[in-house]
Image (cartoon, rainbow, N blue to C red):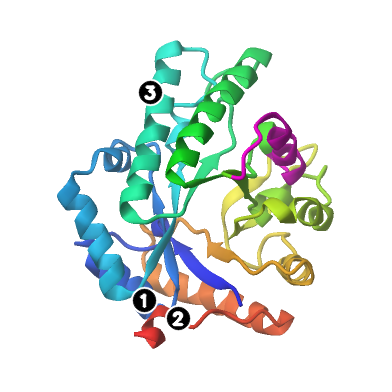
Amino acid sequence: MVSLGIYEKALPKAESWLSRLQLVRELGFNFIELSVDESDERLARLNWTKAQREEVRNASWETGVRIHTLMLSGHRRFPLGSADAEVRKTSLRMLYQAIDLASDLGIRNIQLAGYDVYYEPKTVTTREYFYEDLKLGVEYAAAKEIMLSIETMDDPFINSLEKICEIKTQIHSPWLQAYPDVGNLSAWPSNNVARELEVGVDNIVSVHLKDTQPVTATSKGQFRDVPFGDGTVDFEGCLRTLKRLDYHGAFTIEMWTEKAADPIHEVKVAKQYFDDLFTKVGLEQEEDACLKN
């Protein structure tokens, strides 16, 4: 039994959290992933009032739609490994605020973007700053029993599950785990995707489903906005591998279609694509929220 969710940025903007989660329920998903990205609008969620947090929590209870993960991609703008001490201070504060927000909303997992820095030059020092601040974040998360999971990225700093396993040899905690994106894993020619899943399965807390075009000698690859089936990800092979490894966790369809002409249609097409694949490989999905209530 596995669960299937949708990334918030796949959906059109909604008037309220109740209407947003009602839509998720109508589309047949078990959960949604909350976005705290680089924009001022979504970074402001880290400072939600008690009433705003209550609204989100109540909407989840009323609809039966869970919020599994808080995706903290805002660290791309304010990275843990920045050479600027003030940026690092902001970054760590954001991480603490995200952990507090997750605790208040009943979110189990915070997905961390696996960058030491994104817009700055990478150095041995930025790597060390990243490790130092990540360790502090893990300690804070552990006290609140919130999982931090590092995503395999579109960036060579952390682009494999093997690299996340290496980080865990430096930071020993059950509250630091891995969030593989099969699209990102597949785009890097250095990765043997099936072997990556085999090596990292004991640390996988959730899986992103996204299609990509590969990095080559003449291309930086395409890591987003590739229609499912138009990229080079072997989704059937990845799902069969995870099934053989007895992975029973969550899968999230990752899309950025909130500003598309018809985002709901785009999401329905994607869900049918994966519903068919799950059936083909013999992965049984959790009963959707609409049927359970």
Element type at mark 1: helix
Q: Quadrant of residue 242?
A: bottom right
Q: Quadrant of residue 282?
A: bottom right
Whether the magenta-drawn stretch holds residue 115 is answered as: no
Label disc, if present, on residue 279 of the rendered structure = none
Give the magenta range: 159-174
Image coords of residue 24 (percent x, y): 37, 71
Pointer 1: what residue?
25
Main SS, magenta residues: helix
Pointer 2: what residue?
288
Q: Are marks 2 and 1 in contact (CB under 8 Å)?
A: yes
Looking at the figure, which quarter contains the C terminus? bottom left
Amino acid type at circle 2 is Asp
Say whether residue 4 is left or right of residue 15.
right
Element type at mark 3: helix
- Residue at point 75% right, 51% down? 200
Image coords of residue 84 (percent x, y): 46, 12
Q: Nearer the viewer, residue 145 or 108?
A: 145
Say whether residue 142 is left or right of residue 96.
right
Pointer 3: what residue?
90
Of the numbered discs 1 and 3, the one sitting upstream in the chain is 1
- Dot 1 surroundings within 10 Å: few (below 14), some, or many (20 or more)? many
Looking at the figure, which quarter contains the N terminus? bottom right
Amino acid type at circle 3 is Thr
Image coords of residue 283 (percent x, y): 67, 79
Of the numbered discs 2 and 1, the one sitting upstream in the chain is 1
Element type at mark 2: loop
Instruction: Classify 33 as above or below 50.
Output: below
Of the numbered discs 3 and 2, the one sitting upstream in the chain is 3
Whether the magenta-drawn stretch holds residue 169 is answered as: yes
Identity of the residue furthest to the bottom in this view = 291
